[in-house]
Amino acid sequence: MNRRDFLYRTSLGLAGTAWLGNPLDAQGTPGFRLVDVTKSSGLTFTHNNGAFGGKFLPETLGSGCAFIDYDADGWPDILLVNGSDWPGHRRRRTTLALYRNNRNGTFTDVTKAAGLDIEMYGMGVAVGDYNNDGFPDIFITAVGQSRLFRNTGKGTFVDVTTAAGLGKREAFSTSAMWVDIDRDGHLDLLVCNYVRWTPEQDVFCSLDGKQKSYCTPEAYRGGTCWLFRNRGNGTFEDITASCGIFDSNSKALGVALIDDDQDGWPDLLVANDTEPNKLYRNLKNGKFRDVGLAAGLALSEDGKARAGMGIDAADFDNSGRSGIAVTNFEGEMIGLYRSEGAGRYRDVATRVGVGAPSKNRLGFGCLFGDLDLDGDLDLVVVNGHIDDTVRNIPGNVGYAQPPHLFLNDRGAFRDVAAQVGGGFEQPRVGRGLAFGDFDNDGDLDVLMTTNNGPAVLFRNDRQTNNRSVRFTLTGVTSNRDAIGATVRITHGGITQTRMVRSGSSYLSQSELPVTFGVGTRDLLDRVVITWPNGRVDDFKNVAAGQRYRVKEGGALERA
């Protein structure tokens, strides 16, 4: 089932980096447990990929998930995207699912009451307050017509796709991301598209020349990503052709936000399946230029395009510059790129312990997050194959595959998925992945989706005295969600950086508040917030172990 057959060369190591975290003890104790609370929390969702034997390509890709505080009560709710049965093969009705957080560890299904009881072949989700009214809106990508749902602020959503100027654009859309590309205070929308596929254009592919099998993306032409500029009046303008991102060869699955050149303007990362990955650098004039090849991100070290699925960007080495993770196909290993400055990246996956364990897994959702709150960003990856017939291939790891939880210890990563308990290491056909502190205890909980299977929620239970500090930002002249803002904290000579992001992972959206692990420290020397419009707010002597709300230009307020 491999689409590539190559190995990475050994990468360069990490150097010159300061770390807060302590080495793992002799037993390698992670310092936390991930407990499966799906059933006890009230999540009953099961994904429907519509498979009926026709082997339609979208059936292989699953769907995403999101943490979203839709009622603005400070407690993250959960949104799950669903597929549907195909026309002519109707068996059941499946819809989006919205679960309201009851603030006691449980959720209530409010899908119908919220107006989201809508059937569509959904793929991904992006959450952002595009009209700056204080309530997060939802964009759902789909096979067919993607949809924009405006939050009324009264517990309901209204489909405004046509009114917003986003209608009559049918495609095989995947991940999406809200981002203020021109820093005018209004969130723009980037939508990824995969290949040019419809049921009517389905291609017959076969492994044995007789029985139909799922096609690889090489069987279809690609489709460009779309970029829509927010006019600030509730409508959007399609600027794809003029902004420099048009590429009819792209087969995009994942998207992430990054400030690659640290100039304060958002740049765009796109993970492509069997085509070169893209790094679109913001030219500050409404246009972008692809620098992915020059940056060392487009191809493997031996010059081949890999099967980019999920993607994330974060300062995983506390260097002050974002690195990048990209999940790939079985046999290709995860790409873990360290920034070397001057717009260059080097794949260090093999050198730091991420490459070899991921070689025989097919990765989808991936996220950086400090799960043990030691100050080092860890990496979580969900895995699963695309075709259940892989079970028939001798020596293959299987259709359902265990996830990875790479614990970061001073730049060396170690997979501790089997050590965190709670059934986290169970093989699944994993797809979407999101982080959010659903119980408001200061650490990151984990939500994942599976293809044609259940969503799974893991509660993070700390077993150490490590603490966090969390920030929820509100823009004033910047976009209200402060997407694109950076927060830097300094303590004991160590600096950590986080960005408020939409997108990342695979088809999914994590919560917007940012979380820092600070070990056992009680006090931060300094907190510096750089807002999307360039304004800088600087705070000194900030207590750790707290949640803060910060309005642009205002004071730190405990939440």
Image (cartoon, rainbow, N blue to C red):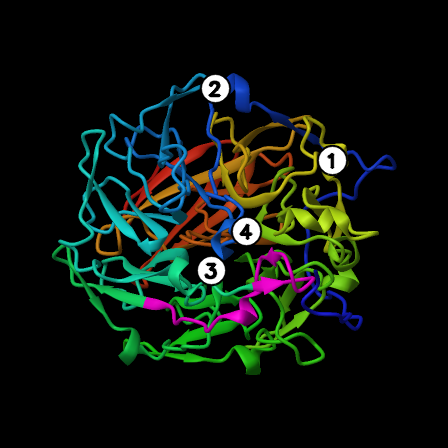
Q: Is the Cβ of the residue at disc 4 closer than 8 Å to that at disc 3?
A: no
What amino acid type is highlighted by mark number 4? Answer: Thr
* Mark 4, secondary structure of its residue: helix
The residue pinned by badge 3 equals 256
The residue pinned by badge 2 equals 105
* Mark 3, secondary structure of its residue: strand
Q: Earlier in the sequence, mark 1 or mark 3?
A: 1
* Label 4 crowd (10 A; few <14 / some 14-19 / many >=20): many
Q: Earlier in the sequence, mark 4 or mark 3?
A: 4
Q: Magenta includes 55?
A: no
Q: Is the Cβ of the residue at disc 1 closer than 8 Å to that at disc 3?
A: no
* Foreground disc of the pair 1, 2: 2
Q: Residue at x 62, y 76 (%)?
A: 299
Q: Position of residue 25 (x, y in %)?
A: 83, 37
* Foreground disc of the pair 1, 3: 3
* Foreground disc of the pair 4, 1: 4
Q: CA–CA distance between discs 1 and 3?
A: 28 Å
The residue pinned by badge 4 equals 60
Q: Inspect this view and state whether residue 110 appears.
A: yes
Q: Which residues are magenta?
A: 205-226
What amino acid type is highlighted by mark number 2? Answer: Gly
Q: CA–CA distance between discs 4 and 3?
A: 22 Å
* Label 2 crowd (10 A; few <14 / some 14-19 / many >=20): some
Q: CA–CA distance between discs 4 and 2?
A: 32 Å
Residue 30 numbered tag: 1
Q: Residue at x 17, y 48 (%)?
A: 160
Asked whether, in this view, residue 301 is left or right of residue 324, the answer is right
Q: Position of residue 557 (x, y in %)?
A: 34, 35
